[in-house]
Amino acid sequence: NAGVTQTPKFQVLKTGQSMTLQCAQDMNHEYMSWYRQDPGMGLRLIHYSVGAGITDQGEVPNGYNVSRSTTEDFPLRLLSAAPSQTSVYFCASKTSGGARTDTQYFGPGTRLTVL
Amino acid sequence: AQTVTQSQPEMSVQEAETVTLSCTYDTSESDYYLFWYKQPPSRQMILVIRQEAYKQQNATENRFSVNFQKAAKSFSLKISDSQLGDAAMYFCAYRGYNTDKLIFGTGTRLQVFP
């Protein structure tokens, strides 16, 4: 049971390049989400998904695309990277439905630098 | 919209002493969940403690306890017998009853001195 995995751990891009941050979980969780963490701003929700084929925008979705073709995977795509997207990105998952005793599991994070 | 505020960007404590981290939140919901997460230098997000709003009793987990004041919308974290390994960034987070989305505060960096 690997939990939530993210690749890569570090990435440097040039402005205008595209890339995909990978996220996978092996806990059969319906809910998956992407956050970005910036100094002094905490974690902010980018996109989330409540199940395969269903995605929705969070607080800061501009510049990012997501898709959810399987329960296990939830990739985050940057189509044209900008310096403002320099951040640490976290993927998280949990069972869906707001159950009272559930826990949100976080991946180890990806540090992205856009030059 | 719900918001979470952590007004202490940095705190420090002597080893073995007690420290309290503050968190306030704003919501119109009557049932919700509150969390404290720890983020050490490794970046891993670690759940420290969870509180369900319908429960009046404050949650405790070993040396970690909360002071949940629902009317005041306050959710502080008390760390007793502080250890060097407690040094980290601490985030307060809110989740509504019928949603899976977490709303985070801006964090408090805790330093522990020997």
Image (spheres, coloured by chain):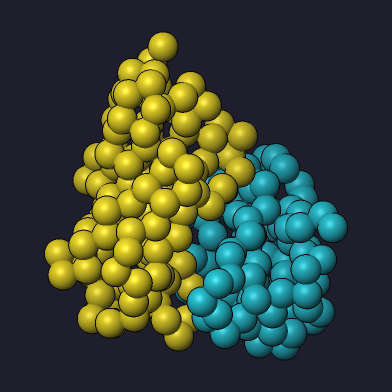
Chain colours: A cyan, B yellow
Left or right of B40: which side holds B93? left
Q: Nearer the viewer, residue A106 or A58?
A: A106
Left or right of B63: which side holds B47? right
For the point 16% across and 70% down, the residue is B71
Do we see residue A9 in this rendering?
yes
For the point 33% across and 18% down, the residue is B14
**Measured from the top left, where is residue B11 in percent x and y?**
29, 30
Q: Is residue B22 above or below residue B111?
A: below
**Measured from the top left, where is residue B43 in percent x and y?**
58, 40
Q: Nearer the viewer, residue A97 or A14?
A: A97
Q: Farthest left residue?
A: B72
Left or right of A31: which side holds B106? left
Q: Farthest right residue?
A: A1
Q: Quadrant of the N terminus of chain A?
A: bottom right
**Measured from the top left, where is residue A91 in percent x and y?**
64, 60
Q: Is residue A85 above or below residue B80?
A: below
Q: Is residue B4 above or below residue B22?
A: below
Q: Is residue B87 above or below residue A93?
A: above
For the point 25% across and 63% down, the residue is B25
Q: Quadrant of the C terminus of chain A?
A: top right
